[in-house]
Image (tube, rainbow, N blue to C red):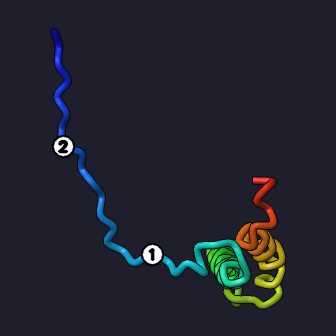
Amino acid sequence: MATAVSEPVATRTRSRVPLPPKLRAPGWYRAALAEVLGLAFAFAITALVRWLQHFHPVVDGNAVTTAAMFSVPLPFLVALAACHYWL
C-alpha cells in the first residue's frame, strides 16, 4: 500500500506595496493614470523611432500627437472598464 507524503508548500510573500484600492478598481482614477501612461508610451515610442531613423529633432510635437491619438484612447477605455465585455 502506497502512502502520499506531503511536502511543505512554499508561500510567496509580497515585497512591494500594492496599489491603493482606487487605482486597482475600474474607474476615473485608473482611467486618468492610463491616459498618462498612454501619453508617456506615445512620447517614448515616437522619440525612439525618430532617433533610430536619425530624424532631427528627435522630439517632434506633431509626431507625438499623432502617436498619442492611437495610444491614449485604448488604455483609457480599458482602465475605465468600458471594454470589459470585449476583452
Q: Splitting the image into 4 quarters, where does residue 4 fall?
A: top left
* Whole-percent x, y for residue 82 in the image: 81, 66
Q: Is residue 20 left or right of residue 11?
A: right
Q: Nearer the viewer, residue 18 or 69?
A: 18
* Whole-percent x, y for residue 34 in the image: 68, 78
* Whole-percent x, y for residue 45 in the image: 66, 74
- State how far apart marks 2 and 1 are (Cα): 27 Å
The residue located at (79%, 70%) in the rendering is: 77
Q: Nearer the viewer, residue 64 or 81?
A: 81
Q: Is residue 84 left or right of residue 15?
A: right
The residue located at (18%, 43%) in the rendering is: 8
Q: Which mark is residue 58?
A: none
Is residue 28 something one can see in this rendering?
A: yes
* Whole-percent x, y for residue 60 in the image: 75, 89
Q: Is residue 12 left or right of residue 43?
A: left
Q: Amino acid at mark 2?
A: Pro
The residue located at (45%, 75%) in the rendering is: 18
Q: Splitting the image into 4 quarters, where does residue 30 fall?
A: bottom right
Q: Crowdedness of circle 1 by 10 Å Cα count: few (<14), some, many (20+)?
A: few
Q: Which mark is residue 18?
A: 1
Q: Nearer the viewer, residue 55 or 16?
A: 16
SS at mark 1 in the image: loop
SS at mark 2 in the image: loop
Q: Earlier in the sequence, mark 2 or mark 1?
A: 2
Is 10 placed above or below 50 here? above
Residue beneath disc 2: 8
Number of the front mark, 2 or 1: 2
